[in-house]
Image (spheres, rainbow, N blue to C red):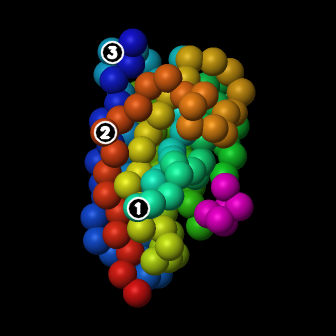
Amino acid sequence: QVQLVESGGGLVQAGGSLRLSCAASGRTLSRYVTGWFRQAPGKEREFVAAVSRSVGTTSYADSVKGRFIISRDNAKNTVYLQMNSLKPEGTAVYYCAARESGGIWYRFDEYDFWGQGTQVTVSS
């Protein structure tokens, strides 16, 4: 099975940018649909973005569309989330998740493998 490790979180001012990485080991990520989720204190884990395993179709939550970009580097077995124009409401722990299937999936309970998460804090 695949193991996922996120990195790249940190503290950034509103309007700034961060790039999160999700490095996979054990299996190639190209076998999996890979998603990013986030969870703020006291809130449910919510979908942010996902990239499909085959042609690399992407999908985004409305709240991040036009600001975030998900991409996959098969050579590095890594998925990235480029986050631009960050807002304070984007403060959360960001998780990478994978599911060994085609298509795009939006619910956190549809993913089988998870990283440990990386904290993103956006100051106003």
Query: Which of pointers 1 and 3 indicates the residue nearer the eye?
Result: 1
| Chain-order first, disc 1 or disc 3 | 3
**Count of picture labels:** 3
> How many angstroms separate mark 2 from mark 3 (CA)?
16 Å
| Chain-order first, disc 2 or disc 3 | 3
Local crowd size for mark 2, using a 10 Å CA cut-off: few (<14), some (14–19), many (≥20): few
Give the label on residue 116, or none: 2
Q: SS at mark 2?
A: loop
Q: SS at mark 3?
A: loop
Callout 1 touching callout 2 (CB < 8 Å)? no
Q: Is residue 10 above or below residue 25?
A: below
> How many angstroms separate mark 1 from mark 2 (CA)?
16 Å
| Chain-order first, disc 1 or disc 2 | 1
Give the label on residue 26, or none: 3
Q: SS at mark 1?
A: loop
Local crowd size for mark 3, using a 10 Å CA cut-off: few (<14), some (14–19), many (≥20): few
> How many angstroms separate mark 1 from mark 3 (CA)?
31 Å
**Amino acid type at mark 2:** Gln
Q: Position of residue 103 (x, y in %)?
A: 71, 27
The residue labelled by disc 1 is: 41
**Amino acid type at mark 1:** Pro
- The residue located at (33%, 23%) in the rendering is 3
Q: Is residue 53 above or below residue 16?
A: above
- The residue located at (47%, 34%) in the rendering is 97
**Amino acid type at mark 3:** Gly
Q: Is residue 123 above or below residue 65?
A: below
Q: Position of residue 46 (x, y in %)?
A: 57, 50
Q: Is residue 27 magenta?
A: no
**Magenta segment boundaries in residue numbering:** 61-66
Q: Of 109 and 123, which appears nearest the observer?
A: 109
